[in-house]
Image (cartoon, rainbow, N blue to C red):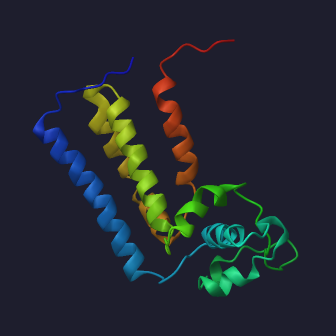
Amino acid sequence: VMCRDTHIPRLRRFFLIAILGTIIFRFQVVKETGWQGYSTDSIAFTHYAAELLIEGRNPYTQSMQPAYTRFNIPPSYITLRYDGTTEDRITYPALNFLFVAPFVKAGLTDIRYLFLIIYCAVLLSLYYYCRADYALLTVTAFCFFMHITSLLAKGNTDPLWLLLILFCVPYFHRPVLV
């Protein structure tokens, strides 16, 4: 049973804002003190594929090799195949560049911020749709995985799939039709 608490006490609101602030602060600290570019080929490929799509080229038929130098990917984060050669095709996650492309077209040069916003939206959704007495605990527990914030700052594309789950949250309480 989900409960939408419309009378959120000030203290709970303060903690929610503090948690979100901590996530954003940690994201920025890791981003600024760590590697000064994308740290995974997954996010570099996603960004580069969006650029190719905007140019009218099919990302699945193009080499992603230029993304390594364009986004300054450290050699230790480059995905290698079983034979030791570098991965140069976009293979996963499928079609995620379609979501990113409008933001790149609008001028977003660092798509990690987009994934941070998605992550915070998921947390706010959890807070809103959880029972009132568990909402803050749920969000707090989710935030203790600070490793996730570090991954976001380095360039993790997984929050995009959380966004799809976010759209389903309002329907979790409904009975399954079989």
Image position of 151 (left or right of 121):
right
**Image position, residue 115 (x, y; %):** 48, 59
- Apparent side of residue 169 relative to residue 64 in the rendered image (left or right): left
| Residue at 77% across, 67% down | 59
- The image quarter in which residue 117 lies: bottom left
The answer to which quarter of the image holds residue 70 is bottom right
Residue 137, above or below 94: above
x, y percent for residue 47: 61, 70
Position of the N terminus, as image quadrant, is top left
Of residues 61 and 112, the one drawn nearer to the viewer in this rendering: 61
Residue closest to the far right = 83
Q: Looking at the picture, tell me which residue is in the foreground, 77 or 153.
A: 153
Residue 107 at what x, y percent from top left? 50, 72
- The residue sitting at 51% across, 67% down in the picture is 106
Quadrant in the picture for the C terminus: top right
* 9 lies left or right of 136: left
Residue 88 locus on image (x, y percent): 79, 75
Quarter location, residue 42: bottom right
Residue at the spot x=43%, y=81% of the render?
Answer: 34
Q: Nearer the viewer, residue 86 or 108?
A: 108
How many discs mark residues in the rendered view?
0
User: Image height check: is 164 above or below 144?
Assistant: above
Q: Quick one: 147 or 106, which is closer to the camera?
A: 106
Image height of 80 relative to 6, above or below: below
